[in-house]
Amino acid sequence: MHLPAATSADTAKASVRSTSTAPRLLAAVPAPPVRAGHPQLSYLQPVPRHMVHRAAITEVFLTDAVRTDEDSFLVAAQWPRDHALYSPGSDGTTDPLLFMETIRQALVYLAHAYYDVPLTHRFIGFGSEFEITDPAALRIGGEPVPVVLEARWVWVGNRPPNRFGMRLDVVLTVAGRPCGHGSLHVVAVDDKRYAMLRGRGAKPRGVAVTGPEPRPVERVHASAVGRLRAKDSVLVRERTDGPWQLLIDVAHPIFFDHPSDHVPLMVTLEGFRQLGHLLLHPGTDPLATEHTLLGMQVDCLAFGELDAPIDLTVRERHPGPVPGTELLTLDAVQNGTVLASCRTTWATAGPAAATGGAPTGAVTRAGAGARALAGAGAGHRVTVPRTA
């Protein structure tokens, strides 16, 4: 449940190394001109991919960042109108997990560009959360969505130069309109400390773990979990009466943008989202209530290994404090150990909206046909490595 590190090829190009016992600012990063009291942000091109720990340029969403105070920043990002994985909902709004990925990229970028965190350090996630407070503001129009994160940097348990503890708190705005908030808490450690934390699971940088021989598993149909492509469904089960498990496909070009020796945080979040979607759209009734994901609160407790099954289980399910919302608390469990715990918040629409309970515009991409598939547990049989 942790963040990927920069690749060795990228770190060789630009390594920011620590030479003191406390974080220091990089004076070489110039601030863009200020106009009307607000820094001018650029959306002309993405930031360098190694600065957000991405191998594919197409997966970089950040375009700029400027400091507004000692530990305050404005971070610009451009969200695509469509994306292979983060596809828009049927109501035309941006996928909420794109917000979480943007927070991740913002924290990594600021750590390297404005603070003395070496590019060679490994980032380990401890917790993350986000909430969409105004879904209508994220409706996709005739061009890519330019967003701004109003970000605040906080040091947490910081012991440089070998261990940096940090948290980034952000407010999401579109055209100056606040529409969400979130945070991410990580530590960044050198290779020696990373190897000590990982124990047997530690592998050389850039080398991924391979699992045992492939075996056939039943992958849930993509539409039943709100996805468009079969390869993006991450829910599987070995038998129809067995537990749902997280499918780990190390060949997936987005989930595994580069080799990793553990399960990336965003893969686990996708598993929680898909299981919640499946549970909340069970029947075949075309008038059944639709749900959309509005928020997540995740505690990362242990590394997820790639070569052992990970069960996704439901701990709690009850109505939320706001009318028209429902809360699901889910756990990811491997070999009897809870790897991560996640509380998800869902909003209802459709028939629920007629009773005055649901936020407007909150519908999912899966319709009655997808609910029928989810209720039947329908999927298709695939052969994958035994890493689910």
Image (cartoon, helix red, strand yellow):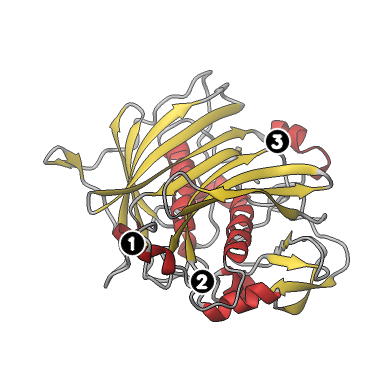
Q: Which of marks 2 and 1 is in front?
A: 2
Q: Nearer the viewer, mark 2 or mark 3?
A: 2
Q: How crowded is mark 2: few (under 14 residues within 10 Å), some or many (20 or more)?
A: some
What amino acid is at disc 3?
Tyr
Residue 269 x %, y %: 59, 53
- Nearest the camera: 258 or 349? 349
- Res. 71 image quadrant: top left
- Nearest the camera: 1 or 369? 369
- The alpha-carbon separation of the residues under discs 2 and 3 comes to 48 Å
Residue 213 x %, y %: 88, 67
The numbered dot on residue 307 is: none
> Taking 299 as reference, is 238 left or right?
right
Is residue 342 placed above or below 222 in the rendered structure?
above
Is residue 365 placed above or below 42 in the rendered structure?
below
Q: How crowded is mark 1: few (under 14 residues within 10 Å), some or many (20 or more)?
A: some
The numbered dot on residue 360 is: 1
User: What residue did someone put label 3 on?
Assistant: 194
> Taking 192 as reference, is 29 left or right?
left
Tell which circle, 2 or 3, labels the residue nearer the N-terminal end: 3
The numbered dot on residue 288 is: 2
